[in-house]
Image: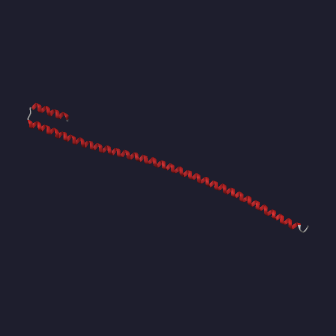
Amino acid sequence: MKYIWPPIMAAIEKRQKEIAEEFASVERAKKDLQRANADAIEKVNKAINQALLITEQANQSRLQILHEAKIEAEAERMRIIAQAQSIITVELLRVREELHKKVSMLVLTGVNKIIERSMDETIDSDIIDKLISKL
């Protein structure tokens, strides 16, 4: 046994050492996998946070654009209203002037008819005064 036992013990010790190294290697791989999983989870969480931030920024940009569009639309509305009021004012003045001319023409026509008939002078002056007061 003296000769058989030392090589068997050496083989057993060698195998034990190999098994221990394999267990250590498995433990290291397990820890590396846990670290890789933790890193992956951290990166996924970081990506989710960035996506949420980008979404929030997009929403803020959308709200800002809508606000600016609303302000521009209101300014355009006010400009159109002012332009329409200006056109209405000019048209009103034109119509008044045209009406004034027509009334003046009617008065002159009436005066001419009165003169042509040669009515009584007091009646003529009364009629003319009435026409002038209506103007």
Q: Quadrant of the N terminus?
A: bottom right
Whether 70 is drawn above or below 131: the answer is below
Task: Name the quadrant containing residue 90.
Answer: top left
Task: Name the quadrant containing residue 32.
Answer: bottom right
Q: Is residue 15 left or right of residue 121?
A: right
Q: Position of residue 64 (x, y in %)?
A: 47, 48
Q: Quadrant of the C terminus?
A: top left
Picture mark count: 0
Q: Position of residue 72 (x, y in %)?
A: 41, 47
Task: Name the quadrant containing residue 92.
Answer: top left
Whether 21 is drawn above or below 73: the answer is below
Q: Farthest residue toward the right?
A: 1
Q: Farthest residue toward the bottom?
A: 3
Residue at screen point 44% across, 48% down? 68
Q: Position of residue 42 (x, y in %)?
A: 63, 54
Residue at screen point 88% across, 66% down? 6
Q: Position of residue 102 (x, y in %)?
A: 19, 41
Residue at screen point 43% across, 48% down? 69
> What colour scheme was applied to this rendering of the protein?
secondary structure
Q: Is residue 42 left or right of residue 129?
A: right
Residue at screen point 29% across, 42% down? 89
Whether 63 is drawn above or below 6: the answer is above
Q: Is residue 40 left or right of residue 11?
A: left
Q: Nearer the viewer, residue 103 or 61?
A: 103
